[in-house]
Amino acid sequence: MLLTIRTTYEPATDLGYLLGKHPERFQTKSLAFGDAHVFYPEANEKACTAALLLEINSIKLQKNRNQQFSESFRLANYVNDRPYVASSFLSTAIAKVLGSALNGNCKDRPNLVDQAIPLEINLTSLPVRGGKEILHRLFEPLGYEVKAENSILDESFPEWGESPYYQVQLKINSPLRLVLSHLYVLIPALDNKKHYFVSEAEIQKLIEKGEEWLKDHPEKDMITKRYLRYRGSFVRSALDQLVNEEVSPQKITENQEEILEKPMNLHALRHQRVIEELKQLEVKSIIDLGCGSGKLLKQLVKERQFQKITGMDISYKSVEVAHKRLYLRDAGPKMKERVSLFHGSLTYCDQRLKGYDAAALVEVIEHLDEARLEALEKVVFQYAQPKVVAVTTPNRAYNVLFEGLPEGQLRHNDHRFEWTRAEFEEWANNVANNHGYTTQFFPLGPVDDNHGAPSQMVVFKLAE
């Protein structure tokens, strides 16, 4: 089984420092199930390729079966596909052989550990249970460009169908440690089996290796279930730990922000103005990004102009509440065809975000760390690229007019920032210039001569 990692970062041979493996040496490490070899078929200033070749020894596999390997191997101790495919054995090899790179340790080039560099990953014979679509669903939200090819099992017997083994190429600009963590978790999830008994310790491995990306992945349920071999209590424990770290952009219960804004009915006003703009622009399909408990969706459903309405939120609980608010479980076929909800993240590319005339982000962006706004911009304006995007956010300058709000305090304890009108306009105009949109700004709520309106909206329109 062969894994190659290639970079064109210059000097490309710095890949050797990141991996902790010298490009001029052929290195071998003995593992419980065989040998892992690391070598460099290409190593110069312009391009460098590191290869991890895994040779699985079937005799070793059988000798260690009772101690380390799952009972499933009883049926095929000596003859099976494991020596030839990218499976959990490869994940183990990554951890054992490339552990320093996986853990982000690099004494000689510490500045490179968190630096995004161009990487090309090639995997031979990656088993994908569920077909090519699963491969794209797991890697594309993380920002990968995915190419995959397979063939029929036997040309003499085409009725046997296509092979579940794929030759896969992945391209991304990313820190190497993150890429290795993706491979470590997703390879066994794609294969949907492991060579060893899944104990409670696997929960912590999953949390540790996926802490930076798994909680926001739109397929985290499937990844967690497959990685933990559908052990129900383990899956629930892992998801609980991941979900508890998340905060939905819109709280289900009444919060300080709602209390402050209630007298001016600002929450309903935002929804009204967004809907008015979308109707005026003759939008037919819309996705509410950060839909929360579905209050905006409830209003959109009343407007027959909107033929396709979708809500997405990072919080499972919010999506469940939105389902109930819209009575989707008891709805007829036409309603279910028109309205849908799903769990997902604003900072990961997801095929389900594409194909809408418009997107709405109502009081959402301020719940993200400013450092993550760049990822949101890429997902919404470059990847999904709806014709219209409506964004609302609080105006910080207006905060001094709210009674009971201490000076300098934000309106909501989950707000990571609140912008003035000038800051909001600067951000929006930069986004528009970078992605080919125009902008139009609107005050929301009563306008104070000195401080402006309590909330603000920008409508992006894709330039023709």
Image: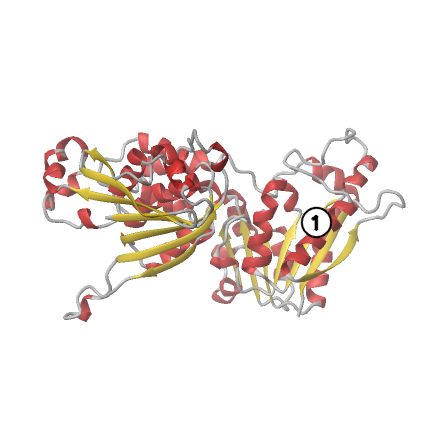
Residue 221 position within the rendered picture, expressed as x and y whole percent measured from the top left:
40, 45
Q: Is residue 273 visible?
A: yes
Q: Position of residue 408 (x, y in %)?
A: 76, 31
Q: Of 18 and 153, which appears nearest the observer? A: 18
In the image, taking residue 277 as reference, residue 179 lies left or right, namely left
In this rendered view, identify the residue nearer to me: 178 or 459: 178
- The amino acid type of the residue labelled 1 equals Trp
In the foreground, 323 or 121 = 121
Quadrant where the image shows the C terminus: bottom right
Q: Is residue 169 above or below residue 373?
A: below
Residue at image mark 1: 427
Give the residue displayed 52% in from the left and 51% down from the top.
323
Q: Secondary structure at mark 1?
A: helix
Q: Is residue 328 positioned above or below 263 on the image?
A: below
The local crowd at label 1, few if under 14, some if 14 to 19, many if 20 or more residues have their Cα within 10 Å, is: few
Query: Residue 273: which quarter of the image?
Result: bottom right
